[in-house]
Amino acid sequence: MDQTLDESKVDLKEAKVKRRMWKPHERLANAFKGTSQWDQAKLGNIDVLRLSVLPVGAPVIPDSFSVISNPEWKEVSKPSLPFGFAWQQSVPGRFDFYFELQKELRCLALGERFSGLNVRGEKHTLISTDNPHHDESMDSMYKPIPFLVVGRQDKFFGIFIDSSAPARFDLDTELTEEGRIELFTRRGFRVFILGGGTLPQLVEAFTTLVGRAKLPPLWSLGHQQCRWSYPDEETVRELAHEFRQRKIPCDTLVLDIDYMDEYRVFTTSKKNFPDLGRMVSELKKDNFKVVTIVDPGVKEDDQYKTFIEGRDKNHFCKNKEGEVFIGKVWPGDSAFPDFLKSQTRKWWADAHKFYTDNGIAGIWNDMNEPAFFGITKVLPPDFSEMPAEEEQFCLHEAQDGEVPHLEVRNLYGFLMSRSTHEGLTSIRPNERPFVLTRSAAAGIQRYAAVWLGDNKSWYEHLGKSIPMLLNVGLSGIPFAGVDIGGFWDDALPELVIRWYEVGIFYPFFRNHCSLSGRGQEAYAYAPSVEGIARKLIETRYRLLPYIRGLFWEHTKTGAPLMRPLMWHYPTDEFACDIDDQFMFGSDILVAPIVERAHEFRTVYFPKGTWYHFETNEKYEGGRPYVIKMPLGTIPAFVREGAIIPLADVMQHTGEYSDKTITFKVYGDKAAGVYFEEDGISWEYEKGGYNEYALTYAGGKFAAKKVHGDFTSNQKFAYVTAGGGKPTPVEL
Ligand code: MIG
């Protein structure tokens, strides 16, 4: 199914006619046959309506893998629906949803989109796709999350299509103030309508529905270094040596596909990594963690344990003849575990003992859309309903029987990461696992962090990372980042510096690049450049206490770490349109330069007083300022009234507990939170953490214990943004 455009086959005459005749999809008559029901419940203060649809011929509404909360549902016969929401089945393999979209409403979330913050005025096809060319003409990406947020100021609604089938959102592309969603399925599904409420309330309700992230292991919030690929043990050791010797902080080294024996997962290359366990334990002495990539494709090879087991125990997806389905990826012909089956997830989970026995700290799941070589469009062109079975690659075993691939494809990466997460958790029950995934579905935050795939070393992609990550956050995923420096192409020093300036605020903080570009490690450039990169990375480590506090906040409210300005300033219409600045928690405004050869940028400050993170210079908000930001500037401004906990510089998080935490006070009257726990175990879930309410007034700093069951030896001080020396304090 190669859909590369063959220009010789384009019928120009026909194309012209089409162009002239084009008009929006006609609304067909409702052809629904089956049963449907509306229920209502509350999630916190938010009203939720749930539509359950079971078309004739489909045995059951499949269990949702995304939704985990089950409030008390009450059936309603005539629900009051926002935006005149209406639905119907138009053809057997398609359901349509219609709603009004008044022009002042903003559209947000929808998972990972190559778009600005407001995703209105575009079409969004949500089918999990590996398309390594991120540009304006791309549509489907790796993380289809059919959760759309619509509204403005203090009134937002959410629409969540709880189905693993492909969906297409048309958010008023014709400027007729209409929204339309097409869901391409023949199975049952549910739709949730949440609201109205403020944007934070809505995300709180949605993350109650689909779950939140646990606190990440502290080490995973440090600096991670990756490359496709560090080819052998020697190179990895050198890498570790460079970081420590040059005093560039780093916690984690990541091994890409070449650590394996011909890309067989759960193996290592005898030649290049003859003893992975030994290498990992040596690196451990230097306080490095090692993360390895694991792809889903299992090499078809009669001599290879994972393939033999998977085939014999029926773990792989099938073709319609009932044989193991084979697709092409890195190992060549490969089989694909059917993660929909709980026995398969268990089998895959247990196999991770191979990695944990070698001391591997975390697992990186890639290619789990799943990617098949050469296929960047998984849906046939011009489809208008769920394609026929023959066009769907393979079959899965679901709760309602055998289902063709596209019906459940959107869950593939999600379930792979769930299996990985469960494997690591059962093998190391006392450690919070670190799993990173490229493909994801709603609720992925319960299992994994995400990165946004194959960007390029382009300023445009640096800039786009902001709105893209903001929408990923509003979709429920707090632990996210993009490849710092960009994945494809050569990253020149200026770009890498500008990227680190933003990247220190990405919740997931990893420098990664492809095999074809030049090395882009922080030390791969002139000493002056390295010096700037070092300062920025050190700043990330200084921010760790604040970052941990933000993750803690997420566990309680679902709030993302990176937030659009409208999250905190919903009635400031100017702020609401900004997507080249963001809030990092409630207290830090980040406004970076994302263009080459620029030293100045306009920064808009919402009402209030703001302090330059480095110079403490003050700005009266409510208007924009032009600010000079030479290369290496930390592009952050702190809200007056905040207290930010900052750690002393460290080389890796193993040093964290020996460092002094300094509470930096902004203004005469300020308040903040300080949170601490052991950074790795599950004790915090049983109360093993400390939380302090910090205040500063009348020249006095005070910390009140809100909760305290964790013994820490941390040392503390406070300092005011006005200047002066830090004063030691006891908590
Ligand atoms: O076909 O493992 O997005 O981060 O380095 C490319 C090699 C496969 C794609 C991932 C990228 C990774 C690369 N992978």
Image (cartoon, rainbow, N blue to C red):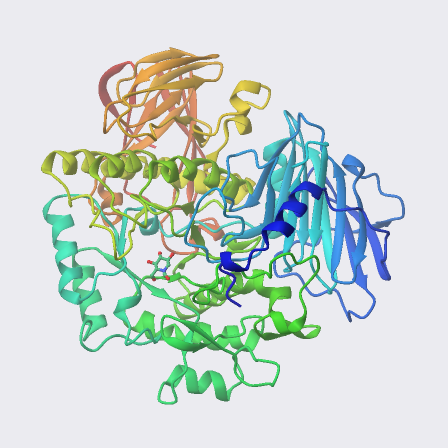
Is 409 left, or right, of 561 in this rendering? right
Question: Which residue lies at the image location 39% right of the left edge and 89% below the top edge?
Answer: 302
> Residue 92: x, y in percent?
78, 62
Toward which corner of the image does residue 196 lie, by quadrant? Answer: top right
Q: Is residue 572 visible?
A: no
Q: How many marks?
A: 0
Say if 451 sits above or below 691 in the image: below
Ligand 1 resides in the quarter of the picture at: bottom left
> Residue 726: x, y in percent?
23, 23
Is 366 left, or right, of 284 in this rendering? right
Question: Which residue lies at the image location 20% right of the left edge and 50% below the top edge?
Answer: 519
> Residue 293: x, y in percent?
34, 64
Say if 341 sits above or below 303 in the image: above
Q: Is residue 674 visible?
A: yes
> Residue 609: x, y in percent?
42, 13
Toward which corner of the image does residue 103 lie, by quadrant? Answer: top right
Toward which corner of the image does residue 322 lie, by quadrant? Answer: bottom right
Is 315 left, or right, of 510 in this rendering? right
Seen from this angle, which residue lies furthest right? 77
Say if 439 sits above or below 638 in the image: below
Say if 207 sits above or below 531 in the image: below
| Residue in the foreground of this view, choosing between 602 and 608 | 602
Question: The C terminus lies in which quarter of the figure?
Answer: top left
| Residue in the foreground of this view, choosing between 685 and 177 | 177
